[in-house]
Each structure stands twice: as structure tokens, then as C-alpha cells.
Image: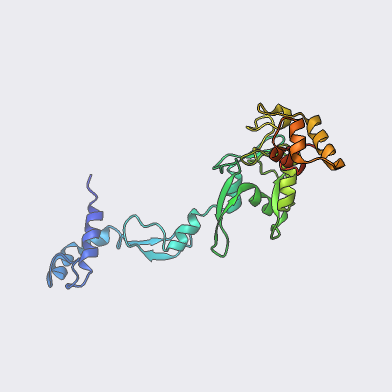
């Protein structure tokens, strides 16, 4: 069924434009004549169809098109705005231990979370860093947010603590997460095994300790030690200098 009132209102809007306006399709002098015929029907249909009340601020405004709902872009933004914290928690699955990030993850399993600060700065951050700031405040310059649970996707604030870069490296080494090509989170699922657990290990932990003790006693070179253990002098040097087998004390 045709919306006759809508048609009349649309014609009325066109006729209100100046005769020189390209939107006035009737030409100079024709608008008043045509409008005089449609004016009674237009008034019965309820007046101007392009006036509306903004549902966000309550202001009466003139719509630029029939689909316009808000009086301004700011009101549209405010109406669709979701608080940062609400967006954050909507992406978190809480278990009895870890609170797991369920949205986008970075290459090492850390949650990715982007947001805009009140002063308009857009930040692409890690989810666990945002969680720490949310619960404890700003992160001091030069410090990192580390995990006690060794679960990169965890954002549980009780599992997070601050530390320096060296603290982060020491924690990685102590938990056996370091590998030849970088850190491998999760000891059981680590790609790189350590010591005699590695498939290509040529020494045992006891031999490593013996090599270091013998060199520390003096009177022997790397090359001489290498002949005793069927290895090159360079390999023995790396063992003594703890460039290899770092985890053996």
C-alpha cells in the first residue's frame, strides 16, 4: 500500500527549496501553485516529516534524510558507546585458576586488546597488561607485567606481577621455557628440550660440571679438554663460559 502522506511530505520538502535550487524540479513560479493544491493534504498528514527528536539528548532537530536517527555524530557515538571495561570482560572466560582471554591472540599466545583513552589516544596493548592497570594502576616505565601461571592468555590479576626485563629472562630460564630460537611457553609442550632430554645431547649434566671444574682448576686448555671429551675447543669454551648448558649449575 502506498504511503500517500509520505509522498506528499516529500513533495512539500522539494517545494520549500528556492526556485534556483537544482533540487526544485518544478522550476521558478511552479512551486507555489502546486503547493497550494497539496497544502491541505500535507497538513492532514501531520506537518513536516523531517523533524524528529534525538533519542540520546532529547533535542528536536531537522533530519537530513529519512533514516537519520541522531541529531549529531556525537549523539550517535554516545548511543553506541560500550565502556572499555565492558568490552574487556566480554572477552574473558574465568576458570577456577586462570582467567583466559578468548579474543585475538598475538604470536606467543598473549591476548591483544585495543582501546582509546579519554584523551583520544588509541592503544594496541596486551590483554594482561590492561588487566594489571585496571586492578593496580599504571605500570611504571621500564617494568614488565609477568605471569606466575605461565599462561600467556591469562588476565587474572592475582597471577600477574611486575618485573624488569632481567626478571623476565630469569623467570623464563628458571622455568625451563628458553630455547634456541626463543622462549617456548609451557614446559611440557615446549618444542626445545634441555640437557639430556634433548635428542641431540652429546654430554650429560655430570660431564658438564666436570668440564667446568677441571678448567677452573687450571693447567689445561679448551683444546686439551676437547680431546678428553671428543669435542672441539670451541664447544668446550662455550660450555665453560656458560654460553651452552646454561641451566646446569
Which residue does the image show at 12% across and 72% down from the upper left? 29
* Residue 55 quadrant: bottom left
* Residue 52 quadrant: bottom left
Q: Which part of the image, by quadrant, shows the N terminus?
A: top left
Which residue does the image show at 75% across and 30% down from the upper left? 229
In front of the other: 203 or 153? 203
Q: Position of residue 146 (x, y in %)?
A: 71, 47
Which residue does the image show at 57% across and 49% down from the upper left? 113
Q: Is residue 218 above or below residue 136?
A: above
Q: Which part of the image, by quadrant, shows the C terminus?
A: top right
In front of the other: 68 or 55? 68
**Could you tell me if residue 59 is visible in this image?**
yes
In front of the other: 197 or 175? 197
Q: Position of residue 9 (x, y in %)?
A: 25, 59
Q: Position of residue 173 (x, y in %)?
A: 73, 41
* Residue 108 quadrant: top right
Amino acid at each position: 500500500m502506498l504511503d500517500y502522506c509520505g509522498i506528499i511530505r516529500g513533495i512539500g520538502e522539494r517545494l520549500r527549496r528556492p526556485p534556483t535550487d537544482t533540487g526544485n524540479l518544478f522550476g521558478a513560479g511552479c512551486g507555489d501553485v502546486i503547493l497550494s493544491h497539496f497544502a491541505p493534504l500535507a497538513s492532514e498528514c501531520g506537518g513536516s516529516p523531517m523533524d524528529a527528536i534525538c533519542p540520546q539528548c532529547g533535542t528536536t532537530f531537522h533530519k537530513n534524510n529519512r533514516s537519520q536517527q541522531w541529531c549529531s555524530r556525537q549523539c550517535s557515538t554516545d548511543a553506541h558507546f560500550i565502556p572499555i571495561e565492558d568490552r574487556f570482560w566480554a572477552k574473558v572466560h574465568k576458570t577456577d585458576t586462570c582467567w583466559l582471554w578468548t579474543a585475538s591472540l598475538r604470536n606467543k599466545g598473549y591476548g591483544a586488546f585495543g582501546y582509546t583513552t579519554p584523551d583520544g589516544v588509541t592503544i594496541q596493548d596486551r590483554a594482561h597488561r590492561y588487566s594489571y592497570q585496571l586492578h593496580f594502576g599504571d605500570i611504571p616505565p621500564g617494568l614488565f607485567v609477568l605471569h606466575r601461571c605461565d599462561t600467556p592468555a591469562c588476565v587474572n590479576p592475582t597471577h600477574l606481577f611486575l618485573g624488569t626485563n632481567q626478571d623476565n629472562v630469569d623467570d623464563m630460564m628458571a622455568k625451563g621455557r628458553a630455547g634456541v630460537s626463543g622462549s617456548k611457553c609451557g614446559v611440557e609442550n615446549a618444542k626445545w628440550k634441555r640437557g639430556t632430554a634433548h635428542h641431540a645431547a652429546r654430554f650429560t649434566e655430570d660431564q658438564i660440571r666436570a668440564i667446568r671444574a677441571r678448567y677452573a682448576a687450571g693447567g689445561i686448555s679448551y683444546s686439551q679438554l676437547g680431546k678428553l671429551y671428543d669435542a672441539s675447543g670451541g664447544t668446550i669454551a662455550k660450555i665453560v663460559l656458560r654460553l651452552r648448558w646454561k641451566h646446569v649449575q
